[in-house]
Image: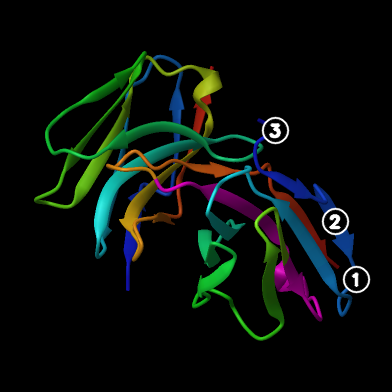
Amino acid sequence: DAGVIQSPRHEVTEMGQEVTLRCKPISGHDYLFWYRQTMMRGLELLIYFNNNVPIDDSGMPEDRFSAKMPNASFSTLKIQPSEPRDSAVYFCASSLIRSGSGNTIYFGEGSWLTVV
Amino acid sequence: EDKVVQSPLSLVVHEGDTVTLNCSYEVTNFRSLLWYKQEKKAPTFLFMLTSSGIEKKSGRLSSILDKKELFSILNITATQTGDSAIYLCAANLILTGGGNKLTFGTGTQLKVEL
């Protein structure tokens, strides 16, 4: 299995531009998570989906951020317009419900965003 | 609001030292406590702890959970420069529908010097 695939790996953009981050979860997984990591705040959960439906977006910082999951194999996180404080590493992760406590969440390699 | 707190925030030690990293949590719907190591890329899994008082070991790393006092520690003995990383603690929470999500602490940045 290829694991969780994210693109782009690195993005440098100017303030005010739209940024779209993409994620392909592991095939068959029914949960997808978007996390943001900064030095100041660590890893924060932004939003998660279950069976392509957004369940909890309370971590999304503001209206400039939006996430979609049009099908089971693809999700996007969009920032419009971007600001320098959005500079962070954005991780996508996926998991599959299993019985018991053995659920494992798998992370992608992250998208390193710099907004100048 | 679910909260995971790690201490210290950063630590510099010399090779051969033993370090103890702390993680406390205040969450609802707790399932387990996970430790990750993060170098330059995505966090890599170290341990999952579900029961109090049972130590998990992997080489020079070990970890234990106290569900009554709501904390966990990660020990690294005989540290090496390759142990330099951010160590993340995460509370694994049960979601409605049976899935789980991770709430992370801010991490402990460990640097091991020669």
Judge whether residue B60 can be spotted in this image. yes
In the picture, the quarter occupied by the N terminus of chain B is: bottom left
Disc 3 target residue = A2
The lab-note entry on whether marks 2 and 3 share a chain reads yes
Number of the front mark, 2 or 1: 2
* Residue picked out by circle 2: A11
Q: Position of residue A69 (x, y in %)?
A: 67, 66
Q: Give the residue pinned by disc 1.
A: A14
- Going by the numbered disc 3, the residue's amino acid type is Ala
Picture residue at 55% right of the left edge, 48% below the top: A29
Query: Dot 1, crowdedness within 10 Å: few (<14), some or many (≥20)?
Result: some
- Rendered residue at 66%/86% (across/down): A63
Asked if residue A74 lies in the magenta stretch, the reply is no
The reply, left or right, for residue B114 in relation to residue A88 is left
Residue placed most toward the observer, A36 or A42: A36
Q: Is residue A91 on the magenta stretch?
A: yes
Please name which of the two marks, 2 or 3, marks the residue nearer to the observer: 3
Identify the subunit bearing mark 2.
A
Place of residue A24 in the rendered image (x, y in percent of width and height, measured from the top left): 71, 50
Q: Quadrant of residue A37?
A: bottom right
Query: In the picture provided, is B64 more to the left or to the right than A88?
Result: left
In the image as oriented, which residue stretches furthest toward the bottom? A63
- Measured Cα–Cα span from mark 3 to mark 1: 32 Å
Which residue is found at the position 36% from the left and 41% from the top?
Answer: B34
SS at badge 3: loop
Q: Nearer the viewer, residue A42 or B77?
A: A42
Q: Are discs 3 and 1 less than 8 Å apart at CB?
A: no
Colour pattern: rainbow
**Labels 2, 1: one chain:** yes
Q: Residue at x 80, y 60 (%)?
A: A114
SS at circle 1: loop
Residue A28 image-quadrant placement: top right
